[in-house]
Amino acid sequence: MARALLLENLHPQASTILAGSGVTPVEHGGAMDEDELVEALQGVAVLGIRSKTQVTERVLAQAPGLQAVGAFCIGTNQIDLDAAAARGVAVFNAPFSNTRSVVELAIAEIIALTRRLTVKDSTLHAGVWDKSAEGSHEVRGRTLGIVGYGNIGSQLSVVAEALGMSVVYYDTAEKLALGNARRAPDLESLLRHSDVVTLHVDGRSGNAGFFGREQLAQMREGAVFLNLSRGFVLDHDALADAVTSGHLSGAAIDVFPEEPKKRGDAFASPLRGLANVILTPHIGGSTEEAQEDIGRFVATKLRDYLRTGSTSLSVNLPAVALDRVPGTARLAHLHRNVPGVLATVNRVLAEHGVNVDGQLLTTRGAFGYAVTDVADGVTPEVVEALRAMPETVRLLVV
Ligand SMILES: NC(=O)c1ccc[n+]([C@@H]2O[C@H](COP(=O)([O-])OP(=O)(O)OC[C@H]3O[C@@H](n4cnc5c(N)ncnc54)[C@H](O)[C@@H]3O)[C@@H](O)[C@H]2O)c1
């Protein structure tokens, strides 16, 4: 029976789903360093981690039985994805599981900033009864400008409209407008027309510092600003000045250019202590619901890969998801992407009298992945002949 090594306290959904598909989960509370991991991976087919375990080239080279790695989180920087692909190890993550959590935090902050809630709260905690409507607004009827209309931005658009906000968005890519949202012709136009501006752009390097003094100055007097995307996209000193001068009436920031490494570490920012500025420690996606969804999503991807060879949504292998022809065996062949490989696979099968019932090939960069369903005839000789092809990276029979 295949074994799965699950590190870093994954959600129980992970071991339940893997155990239900015939994999024996072995759990370990914390992360492991390189040497510990090399030792622990002997005889392991599946590795489950979060962000702290580094899956290096050396680890992968010494784990010949490893077939798949599940990153039970969003990022995959902790894994050498190219080295994993070169050894036929599929890597999966959970790109959408915390989308709703980020959207709900953004909505909470839009309302809190527009009502100056944290100011009222801290004043009353200080023992002062400041009952007044001055500077407090409903969000209904106000314009929300969403910069970056991807998974999070577009879902925020739907929820904000349900609250009666008028939504305008700007994205560098062509995006379908949901509901009554309108596309802004350019960023400046969005900034000049929005009461609330919120950033949901991705972390491409070209976005470094793209929102600075010039963009803040283009925002409406008294508008509020949110960033729950990436810390390095925003000039934090410029934002502090825009709030201190009164040009903006508030801001909510969840992500920072330099974030402390661990819980309890000190935090420095020019935004600390400013009125009507909400600071949160990168918790946009941190909810118990998101954790559960991550556990379910990634474990299901790993299970499907082991059962069917499906690489749908893999972050490092060509994506193939082929409906299984009933009653067939499946040959999942990862190979170097050079001309003629599929022809050679089919020639080997034909020479051994094996008929192909279904087949799909996809390529991604240096690799190709061919999934072939055959009714019978998958003998050890056939498997050996396919494995012996010089282009073969890995062959799974599932
Ligand atoms: N705060 C958190 O805890 C948390 C949690 C999850 C995701 N995030 C971050 O939120 C951001 C959005 O996530 P997503 O899943 O919606 O990503 P996504 O890739 O689905 O969407 C990003 C969108 O931004 C657009 N874009 C990129 N650069 C742009 C620019 N300069 N101007 C306008 N549009 C631009 C892209 O075309 C894309 O449509 C990411 O940076 C992600 O890392 C933060």
Image (cartoon, rainbow, N blue to C red):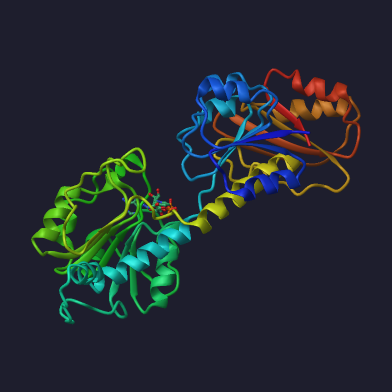
Location of the N terminus (image quadrant): top right
Residue at figure coordinates x 44%, y 73% from the top left: 179
Quadrant of the image occupied by residue 247: bottom left
In the rendered view, would you say 280 is above or below 353? below
Residue at figure coordinates x 75%, y 18% from the top left: 388
List x then y, in percent, for residue 79.
50, 31
Q: Is residue 124 visible?
A: yes
Location of the C terminus (image quadrant): top right
Q: Nearer the viewer, residue 44 or 196?
A: 44
Residue at figure coordinates x 10%, y 59% from the top left: 244
Q: Nearer the viewer, residue 391 or 343?
A: 391
List x then y, in percent, for residue 180.
41, 75
Residue at figure coordinates x 62%, y 51% from the top left: 296
List x then y, in percent, for residue 354.
88, 32
In the rendered view, would you say 361 is above or below 150? above
List x then y, in percent, for residue 129.
17, 78
Quadrant of the image occupied by residue 364: top right
Quadrant of the image occupied by residue 148: bottom left
364 vs 396, left or right, is left
Q: Is residue 310 visible?
A: no
